Amino acid sequence: MGMAQYHYLRECELSAALAQTRVDLAAGLSVQESAEAHLARLDAM
C-alpha cells in the first residue's frame, strides 16, 4: 500500500470515529468532564 492510500484510509477512519463520537454525545452516552474530574471518577470506581 502506498503512502497516499494509507493517508486516505487513515482520514476515513478518523472521520468515522468523529461521526460516532458525535452520535454518542447526542445520545448522552459520553461524559464531558475535566481531566481532574475524570481521574476522580476513576478513583471512585
Image (cartoon, grey):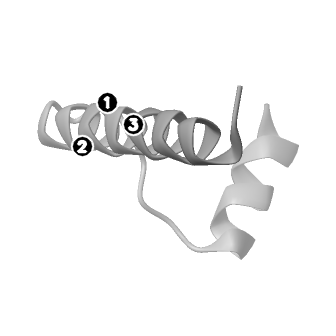
Could you say whether the residue bearing mark 3 is in a helix, strand or loop?
helix
Q: Amino acid at mark 3?
A: Cys
Q: What residue lies at 34% left-to-right and 43% top-to-bottom?
A: 15
Say which residue label 3 marks: 12
Q: Amino acid at mark 1?
A: Leu
Say which residue label 2 marks: 25
Q: Amino acid at mark 2?
A: Leu
Marks 2 and 3 sit apart, C-alpha to C-alpha, by 20 Å
Say which residue label 1 marks: 29
Q: What residue lies at 71% left-to-right and 25% top-to-bottom?
A: 1
Q: Eyeballing the image, is 13 above or below 32?
A: above
Which residue ends up furthest to the right in the rendered image?
43
Q: What residue lies at 58% left-to-right and 74% top-to-bottom?
A: 34
The reply, left or right, for residue 1 in relation to residue 20 is: right
Marks 3 and 1 sit apart, C-alpha to C-alpha, by 23 Å
Q: Eyeballing the image, is 23 above or below 32?
A: above
